[in-house]
């Protein structure tokens, strides 16, 4: 893979573009909203602006980094699968939607994968490579190879809500919030216990303060809607704190 | 006025007991390591000796100190009567309420009234252990983490009957052992097992459902969440038999599905895939041994 295309001028897109350039790949970008490109090119001069999707036909991979809205993602794949028939791999970077549903808008979903870059992308080496219902093994292999080329570590995951990390992480955080609410221990002792006892880099309460209480509420609500699993139900204390305007460390205070 | 250092005793020379004995002896306390089975006692003392050998090799301990610990400070014994002068007795025997209660009642007969009896239980109620001890106000939970000789944390848990004096003394002794202490309520699993057992079962269930491979789930947890070990690496270290027992112990107390062991846990126990100690669990291993130096 010598050239990749990125559609959607988002922070994630800019980050991927910079990493791809650093890895020696040619990068072309395109967005319907052209105004957002200037800061990108200021940051990484090697990025080329494509003249529409047609400028991406010679890419080995075209991925979208549009806002995580289902219709935007579907719209991209519907267009891209028509305009980019020779591109062997198309990817969506959705974190919160069903990759198979997005891929289904493509004429040939076999070449579509999900690429979930874990936040923050600059500090996290993990990429979840999501296998949609129709994704071909060759597409998965190409995607994994692309990730390794960026110096990242790919893991292959079934197209299931939350993939691996959020699926395991959200219930853990909810459990911690409930335990604190029920007075299992002080917040300092809860954080200390999990840091020292289990070697976690941060305790759950300091982590939720940093991630943002509202962000976690939205994540767990979305997973709860899709999975119907009680472990994802937003804890009362989270709703109470967000309701009171306590959104995190720098926004009204958190825990 | 300098107080004379209290004598410590650790009951049970298994992995946990040996690890706690290392912590006590390393902190400069005379420490009895007690086990009623000669073979277990010998194995525990041998593991401890090899641990301190590694510490010497790594320059963390002088050979002289190592010898002092092994020949003077650390005293393996099969005889409970040796504990008559102990200030703190920490039991780390098999995780069974009746066995622990019986043992605490025996120790109660031997030790002076001021001796604190601590339990290293991770799943049983301190309140219920204290109830059969004959000195319920001087019983407390001190749960060391696996591997105790490496991990700095101790969960200190008061039963309903534990006196404030006992709690204060346990905190003081815990600090003197060089440990970091957190205080928890006497609820099933305290903090650590309450979280890690639920998390590990969620990971096993995710694997059962084909979410991803063992290797990829381990990798995702390590890189994505920054945990030091993947869940399956950790389970192999804990042992599937132990994980099954702890899961059931928690489930039986709270009837919360997060603790219910997935079917694969029992299957792996039946197959003898217990983890590192049998050479195979979720991963395969060449050699067993004690962690750290």
Image (cartoon, rainbow, N blue to C red):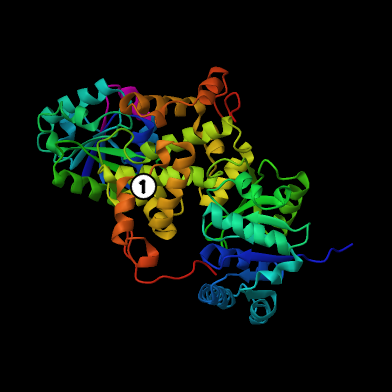
Give the letter of the chain under mark 1.
B
Q: Residue at x 38, y 37 (%)?
A: A166
Mark 1 crowdedness (10 Å alpha carbons): few <14, some 14-19, many ≥20: many
User: Is the residue A24 above or below the residue B74 in the image?
Assistant: above
Magenta extent: A29-38
Q: Is B157 covered by the magenta stretch?
A: no
In the image: residue A212, left or right of residue B271: right
Percent position (x, y) of residue B127? 63, 44
- Residue matched to label 1: B220
Query: How far from the left and from the top, in percent, is residue B87?
Result: 75, 62
Front in this rendered view, residue B110 or A113: B110
The residue positioned 69% from the left and 75% from the top of the image is: B73
Please say whether residue B226 is visible from this viewpoint: no
Q: Nearer the viewer, residue A224 or A148?
A: A224
Look at the image and tell me in which quarter the N terminus of chain B lies: bottom right
Q: Is residue A34 magenta?
A: yes
Whether residue A135 is visible to the viewer of this picture, yes or no, is yes
The residue furthest right is: B1
User: Picture quarter containing residue B83?
Assistant: bottom right
Secondary structure under tag 1 reads helix
Above/below status of B62 relative to A243: below
Query: Image height check: is A107 above or below B101?
Result: above
User: What residue sits 58% from the left and 18% below the top?
Assistant: A244
């Amino acid at each position: 893979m010598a050239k990749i295309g990125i559609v959607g001028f988002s922070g994630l897109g800019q980050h991927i573009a910079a990493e791809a350039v650093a890895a020696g790949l040619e990068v072309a970008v395109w967005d319907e909203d052209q105004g957002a490109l200037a800061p990108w090119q200021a940051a990484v001069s090697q990025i080329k602006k494509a003249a529409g999707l047609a400028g991406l036909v010679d890419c080995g991979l075209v991925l979208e980094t549009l806002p995580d809205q289902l219709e935007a993602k579907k719209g991209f794949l519907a267009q891209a699968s028509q305009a980019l028939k020779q591109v062997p791999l198309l990817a969506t970077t959705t974190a919160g939607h069903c990759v198979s549903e997005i891929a289904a808008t493509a004429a040939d979903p076999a070449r579509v994968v999900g690429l979930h870059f874990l936040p923050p992308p600059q500090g996290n080496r993990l990429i979840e490579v999501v296998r949609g219902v129709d994704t071909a093994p060759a597409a998965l292999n190409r995607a994994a190879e692309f990730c390794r080329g960026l110096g990242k570590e790919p893991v292959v995951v079934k197209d299931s809500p939350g993939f691996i990390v959020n699926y395991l992480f959200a219930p853990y955080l909810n459990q911690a919030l409930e335990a604190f609410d029920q007075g299992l221990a002080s917040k300092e002792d809860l954080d200390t216990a999990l840091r020292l006892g289990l070697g976690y880099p941060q305790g759950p309460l300091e982590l939720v303060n940093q991630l943002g209480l509202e962000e976690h509420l939205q994540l767990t609500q979305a997973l709860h809607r899709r999975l119907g699993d009680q472990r994802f139900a937003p804890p009362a204390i989270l709703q109470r704190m967000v309701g009171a305007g306590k959104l995190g460390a720098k926004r009204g205070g958190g825990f | 006025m300098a107080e004379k250092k209290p004598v410590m005793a650790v009951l049970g020379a298994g992995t946990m007991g040996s690890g706690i004995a290392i912590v006590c002896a390393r902190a400069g306390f005379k420490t009895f390591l007690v086990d009623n089975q000669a073979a277990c006692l010998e194995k525990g003392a041998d593991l401890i000796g090899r641990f301190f050998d590694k510490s010497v090799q790594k320059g963390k301990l002088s050979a002289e100190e190592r010898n002092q610990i092994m020949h003077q400070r650390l005293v393996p014994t099969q005889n409970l009567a040796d504990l008559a002068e102990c200030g703190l007795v920490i039991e780390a025997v098999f995780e069974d309420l009746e066995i622990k209660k019986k043992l605490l009642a025996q120790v109660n007969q031997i030790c002076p009234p001021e001796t604190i009896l601590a339990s290293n239980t991770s799943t049983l109620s301190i309140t219920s252990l204290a109830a059969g001890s004959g000195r319920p106000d001087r019983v407390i939970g001190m749960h060391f983490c696996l591997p105790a000789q490496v991990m700095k944390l101790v969960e200190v848990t008061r039963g309903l009957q534990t006196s404030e004096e006992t709690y204060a003394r346990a905190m003081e002794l815990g600090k003197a052992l060089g440990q970091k202490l957190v205080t928890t309520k006497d609820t099933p699993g305290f903090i650590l097992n309450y979280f890690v057992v639920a998390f590990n079962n969620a990971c096993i269930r995710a694997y059962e459902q084909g979410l991803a491979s063992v290797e990829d789930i381990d990798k995702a947890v390590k890189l994505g969440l920054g945990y030091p070990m993947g869940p399956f690496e950790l389970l192999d270290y804990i042992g599937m038999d132990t994980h099954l027992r702890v899961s059931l112990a928690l489930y039986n107390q709270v009837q919360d599905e997060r603790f219910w062991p997935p079917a694969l846990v029992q299957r792996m126990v039946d197959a003898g895939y217990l983890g590192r100690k049998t050479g195979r669990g979720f991963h395969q291993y060449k050699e067993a041994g004690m962690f750290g130096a």
